[in-house]
Amino acid sequence: MRSYEMTEVVGRGLDEVLTEAFAIATDECDAVFLSVDVDVVDPGSRRAPGPEPGGLSSRQLLDAVRRIAMELPLAGMDVVEVSPPTTTPGSRPFWRTAGARGTLGIAWRRRHGPAKPSASRGTPARGRRPPI
C-alpha cells in the first residue's frame, strides 16, 4: 500500500500526487472506495480539534474529492471521524459538503462518463461543467 506524507504532497504538489495515486488505485481493479478521514484536514481549516497541524486545507480536500469522484470509478465513499461532541459548531456542514461533492461527482460520472483531467488543477476538460 502506498501512502503519502504531507511533505511529499507539498513538495510534489497535490495534483501530481493524486495522479500517481489514481494510477496505483486503479491498477487491476474495477472500482475503488473513497474514505475521507477528517484528520487529513488542518485543524485550523476545519474549526475542530485535531491531532496534526499542517494537513490539507478544506479547499484542497473539496477539490480532491471532486476530482476523485469525477475521474475514478468509485464503488462508494464515506466521511469518517466526524465527532459531534468535539466538532466546533458550524463545521459539520463542511463535512456534508465533502460527502455531497463526492456523491454528485459519482452521479455526474455515471451519466456523462469519466471526466478527462485538464492541465489546470485536475478540473474536468469536458464541455459541460459538473454541478459541484
Image (cartoon, helix red, strand yellow):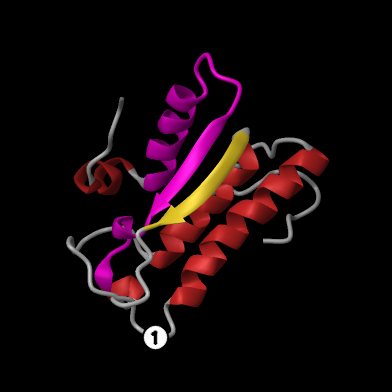
Instruction: Using the image, determine if residue 9 lies above or below residue 101.
Output: above
Residue interval drawn in magenta? 14-43
Q: Where is residue 6 in the image (x, y as percent from the top left)?
A: 24, 48
Q: Position of residue 58 (x, y in %)?
A: 41, 66
For residue 103, say whether it is visible: yes
Instruction: Using the image, determine if residue 50 lies above or below residue 66.
Output: below
Residue 61 falls in image quadrant:
bottom left
33 part of magenta stretch: yes
For residue 121, say whether it is visible: no
- Label 1 neighbourhood size at 10 Å, few (<14), some (14-19), many (20+)? few
Residue positioned most to the top: 28
Residue at point 52%, 23% (across, down): 26
Q: Position of residue 96 (x, y in %)?
A: 54, 67
Residue positioned most to the bottom: 89
Instruction: Using the image, determine if residue 110 lies above or below residue 56.
Output: above
27 part of magenta stretch: yes
Residue at point 38%, 46% (across, down): 14
Residue at point 27%, 38% (across, down): 4
Depth order, front residue of 64/49: 49
Q: Mark 1 points at which residue?
A: 89
On the picture, is 86 further left or further right than 32? left
Q: Position of residue 51 (x, y in %)?
A: 17, 62
